[in-house]
Image (cartoon, rainbow, N blue to C red):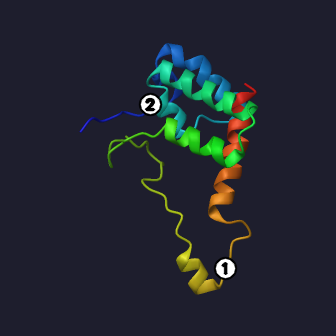
Amino acid sequence: MPRIPQPATIADTPEASRPLLDAVVKQLGSAPNLFRLVATSPQALEGYLALSGALSKGALPAATREQVLAEAIRLDVPAGAVVYREGDAARTAADTSRIRAELGWEPLTEFQEGLAAQWRWAAARVARA
C-alpha cells in the first residue's frame, strides 16, 4: 500500500505549494491537514482550490457542490498512512450516542447540515484568497 507522508508545516511542502498554502492560512487562520496533504502535489492543491472556488461561484445548490467536490478529492489513504505530529489527535469520531444516552443531549444542528455549513464557510474563505 502506498503511504502519503503529510507535511508537518508549510515549509515542508514543495516550494510551489507554499504560496497557495499561505493564502489558505490567510483566509482560514491555519492550513488544515487535508490542504497540507494535497499540497504534496502543487498541481493537485492548485486544482483543488480552483475547483472549490469555481463551484462556489456557480448556480449548483450547496449540497450538490459539496458532493461534486467530495467526489473530486476522494483520497484512498490507508489507515496509518498519515504521519501524526506530537499533539495531533490520532483519530476523531462524531459519535454522539454516549452524550445523548448519559446526559440527554440533542444537537441543535444535524451533523450533515453542520458539516455542509462548515464546508461552505471554509470554501468561501479560500475562494476569496
Please state the horizontal and vertical placement of residue 48, each as a whole percent of the image: 56, 28
Q: Report helix, strand or loop for mark 2.
A: loop
| Comes first in the chain, label 1 or label 2 | 2
Please state the horizontal and vertical placement of residue 124, each as a whole percent of the image: 73, 36
- Compare residues 104 and 66 and report the one nearer the observer: 66
At x 46%, y 17%, the residue is: 14
Quarter of the figure with residue 104: bottom right
Please state the horizontal and vertical placement of residue 63, each as a whole percent of the image: 66, 49
At x 62%, y 24%, the residue is: 50
Quarter of the figure with residue 94: bottom right
Is residue 61 toward the left or the right of residue 42 in the image?
A: right
- Is residue 36 in view? yes
From this view, report whether residue 65 is shown above or below residue 105.
Answer: above
Q: Residue furthest left?
A: 1
- Is residue 25 in view? no
Q: Residue furthest top?
A: 16
Mark linked to residue 105: 1
Q: Amino acid at mark 1?
A: Trp
Mark linked to residue 7: 2
Foreground: disc 1 or disc 2: 1
Q: Quadrant of the N terminus?
A: top left
Q: Amino acid at mark 2?
A: Pro
Q: CA distance from mark 1 to mark 2?
A: 37 Å
At x 61%, y 17%, the residue is: 19
